[in-house]
Image: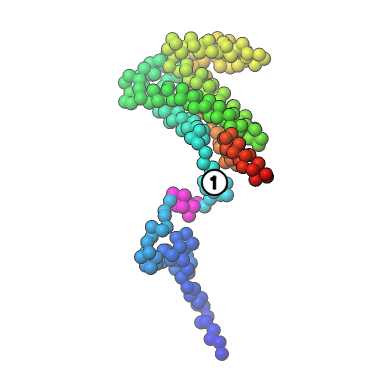
């Protein structure tokens, strides 16, 4: 005769190993949480179970399929030129961080702009260093983004199915140049003032939208007190917001479509395929 379990009491289940840290951390009989360590597994060496930031976040937050694809996708190993895009991203992040610190002490008004820039450079602790990073970092970013664009064009990464990513990159180059233009006026010295007048007048000579663009940048028909505050708002809010959105789309398409192999790798593969057909 079979012996039935006592009513009101669940049969105890054998302790199961934790799926997150197999063989080391055991769960209790009710399966609700860890109850102890497996001494035998610890003797073998707990170093076999590495602890990483990705694993820590996965255990607590979980990961979407898109995030898993981004973090754990296979990237072909080519040459150092494939680091140019990441270098542009680092340069943009440097500009954003230094720009935030400069904005804490900068006053975008016609009467105080030059004085606040001089205060940052001459009196503020590490102000000259941060301003120098921001000033020369803009030049570095422009150089890097043109090198990245040239590499993309030379490798043929603008062709199908990556046309949209190429167009986004072209827009990002334009926004980078516009950020350099709007930031050049902010010190509000004689050189930046007259150079900005020349640049805006050149933009105003463009076909169809040129006059409207000039009036938009100046805040009217002529340079006035609104011009510098408008340049500051465009430089600090409008352009960075657009760039962050486009950089996100750019990285998404790179992750989805992958990278293009260099021309010499494509040529070598074509020769190998031709030999196989022979």
Q: Residue at x 55, y 27 (%)?
A: 150
Look at the picture and state if 73 lies above or below 227.
below
Q: Quadrant of residue 271?
A: top right
Q: Quadrant of the N terminus?
A: bottom right
Q: Residue at x 53, y 25 (%)?
A: 146
Percent x, y of residue 234: 53, 23
Q: Is residue 221 left or right of residue 12?
A: right
Look at the picture and state if 225 lies above or below 159.
above
Magenta span has 57? yes
Percent x, y of residue 276: 65, 45
Percent x, y of residue 190: 43, 9
How does the figure colour the protein chain or chains?
A: rainbow
Q: Which residue is mark 1?
A: 74
Is residue 225 visible in the rendered structure shown here? yes
Depth check: 110 or 131 in front?
A: 131
Magenta span has 216? no
Depth check: 258 or 15 in front?
A: 258
Q: Residue at x 60, y 12 (%)?
A: 204
Q: Quadrant of the C terminus?
A: top right
Depth check: 267 or 6 in front?
A: 267
Magenta-tinted stretch: 53-61
| Mark 1 crowd level (few <14, some 14–19, many ≥20, 10 Å Cα) | few
Depth check: 212 or 46 in front?
A: 46
Of helix, strand and loop, which one carries label 1? loop
């Amino acid at each position: 005769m079979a012996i039935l379990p006592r009513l009101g009491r669940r049969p105890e289940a054998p302790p199961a190993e934790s799926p997150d840290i197999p063989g080391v951390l055991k769960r209790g009989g009710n399966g609700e949480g860890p109850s102890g360590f497996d001494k035998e597994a610890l003797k073998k060496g707990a170093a076999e179970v590495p602890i990483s930031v990705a694993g820590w976040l996965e255990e607590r937050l979980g990961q979407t399929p898109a995030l898993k694809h981004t973090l754990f996708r296979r990237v072909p190993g080519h040459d150092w030129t494939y680091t140019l895009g990441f270098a542009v991203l680092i340069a943009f992040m440097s500009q954003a961080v230094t720009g935030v610190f400069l904005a804490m002490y900068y006053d975008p008004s016609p009467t105080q702009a030059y004085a606040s820039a001089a205060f940052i450079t001459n009196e503020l602790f590490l102000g000259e260093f941060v301003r120098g990073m921001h000033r020369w970092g803009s030049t570095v970013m422009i150089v890097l983004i043109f090198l990245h664009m040239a590499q993309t064009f030379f490798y043929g990464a603008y062709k199908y199915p990556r046309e949209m990513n190429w167009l986004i990159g072209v827009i990002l180059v334009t926004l980078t140049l516009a950020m350099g233009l709007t930031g050049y006026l902010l010190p509000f010295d004689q050189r930046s003032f007259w150079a900005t007048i020349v640049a805006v007048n050149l933009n105003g000579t463009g076909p169809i939208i040129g006059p409207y663009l000039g009036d938009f940048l100046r805040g009217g028909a002529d340079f006035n007190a609104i011009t510098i505050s408008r340049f500051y708002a465009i430089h600090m809010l409008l352009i960075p917001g657009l760039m962050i959105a486009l950089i996100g789309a750019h990285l998404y398409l790179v992750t989805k479509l992958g990278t293009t192999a260099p021309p010499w790798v494509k040529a070598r593969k074509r020769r190998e395929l031709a030999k196989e057909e022979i």
